[in-house]
């Protein structure tokens, strides 16, 4: 009855009447990871916005690369918004989730190990959007650097053009903190003021209000990579915060924070290895979840220099002591 009433109202207002499409999910195959990143039973939902934040070197991009690689196996189109201009094909091919080859053909992403089958992003099926110097709006005499408004408009155009061909997609923004807004670009280094300083959070407020609806309409899983900043004036509470204002906090359906665990460095102890660092260990914690997961749940991960991402349960203090 409610659907018929809504169709009648939309017809009266000359609005498009659309049939409801159930949400699609990306099952990671790891129940604990599903609980952290999305729905505890179904997996990570397409049509949602997820913010992944943390300090440098904790594996934020590697986590998103691994999810994007898994989504490609799931038939999704992957668009990588490389605002930091740090994406490389060789690095992307090394990332992915470890899939064990010795589990009788069943999907197993926990084992990892030497015999695991590795898969990274298929760069031939990946669309990368990066900042570039060019001419815009017919002004061929004054080349300049692209702005965040122009690059996100390109991402939106891709979503609009390809959503009928692809029933699901993954959009990665790496990273929010590196976006250069039009106001900042026009002011330059010497003309910065309070107004240009506030242009970044104001832009993200406008952008994410749009992307909340677009992500659901196009079954797009949007992964926002964000940094951490420390407030030196904070006397109480958590001094760490994410740049970009309140918009990423408010409009993200899921927010997770990655950090290194105690004794995070993985060293090469083999003969001739000389104790060189070959990987890190970290913990992924959910700090907001509106899609059926569990807030404050955690999942540990291991990231090797030349290998995939492996997830495993977080050890309790008693287990670590043993």
Image (spheres, rainbow, N blue to C red):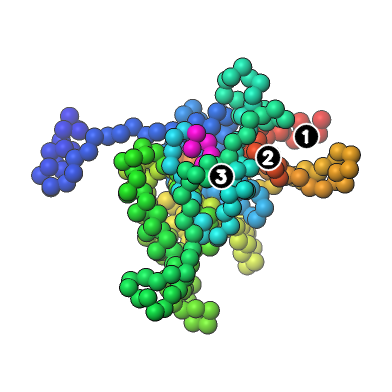
Residue carrying label 2: 307
Could you tell me how far apart the alpha carbons at marks 3 and 1 are, in whole angstroms? 29 Å
Q: Taking the image as drawn, is residue 189 in sight? A: yes
Nearest to N terminus: mark 3 or mark 2: 3
Q: Eyeballing the image, is 266 above or below 35?
A: below
Quick check: 16 left or right of 172?
A: left
Nearest to N terminus: mark 1 or mark 2: 2
**SS class, disc 1:** helix
Quarter holding the C terminus is top right
- Say which of 313 and 100 sits in front: 100
Quick check: marks 1 and 2 in contact, CB under 8 Å? no
Quick check: 305 left or right of 200?
A: right
Residue carrying label 3: 65
For mark 3, does the 10 Å Cα neighbourhood hold few (<14), some (14 to 19), or many (20 or more) residues? many
**Main secondary structure type of the part rendered in magenta:** helix
Q: Taking the image as drawn, is residue 243 in sight? A: no
């Amino acid at each position: 009855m409610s659907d018929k009433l809504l169709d009648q109202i939309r017809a009266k207002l000359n609005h498009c009447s659309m049939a409801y499409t159930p949400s699609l999910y990306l099952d990671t195959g790891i129940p604990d990871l599903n609980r952290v990143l999305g729905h505890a039973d179904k997996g990570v939902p397409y049509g949602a916005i997820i913010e992944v934040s943390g300090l440098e070197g904790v594996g934020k991009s590697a986590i998103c690369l691994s999810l994007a690689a898994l989504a490609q196996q799931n038939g999704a189109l992957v668009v990588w918004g490389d605002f930091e201009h740090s994406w490389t094909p060789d690095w992307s091919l090394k990332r992915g989730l470890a899939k064990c080859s010795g589990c009788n053909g069943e999907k197993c992403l926990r084992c990892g190990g030497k015999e695991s089958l590795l898969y990274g992003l298929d760069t031939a099926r990946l669309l990368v959007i990066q900042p570039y110097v060019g001419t815009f709006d017919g002004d061929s005499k004054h080349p300049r650097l692209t702005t965040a408004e122009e690059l996100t408009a390109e991402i939106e155009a891709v979503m609009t053009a390809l959503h009928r061909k692809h029933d699901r997609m993954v959009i990665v923004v790496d990273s929010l903190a590196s976006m250069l807004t039009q106001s900042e670009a026009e002011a330059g280094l010497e003309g910065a003021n309070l107004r240009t300083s506030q242009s970044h959070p104001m832009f993200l407020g406008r952008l994410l209000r749009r992307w909340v609806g677009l992500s659901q309409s196009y079954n797009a899983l949007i992964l926002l990579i964000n940094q951490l900043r420390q407030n030196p004036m904070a006397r109480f509470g958590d001094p760490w915060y994410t740049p970009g204002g309140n918009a990423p906090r408010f409009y993200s359906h899921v927010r997770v924070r990655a950090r290194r665990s105690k004794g995070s460095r993985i060293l090469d102890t083999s003969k001739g290895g000389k104790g060189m660092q070959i990987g890190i260990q970290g913990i992924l914690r959910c700090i907001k979840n509106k899609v059926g997961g569990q807030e404050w749940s955690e999942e540990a991960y291991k990231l090797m220099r030349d290998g995939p991402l492996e997830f495993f349960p977080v050890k309790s203090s008693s287990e670590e002591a043993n």
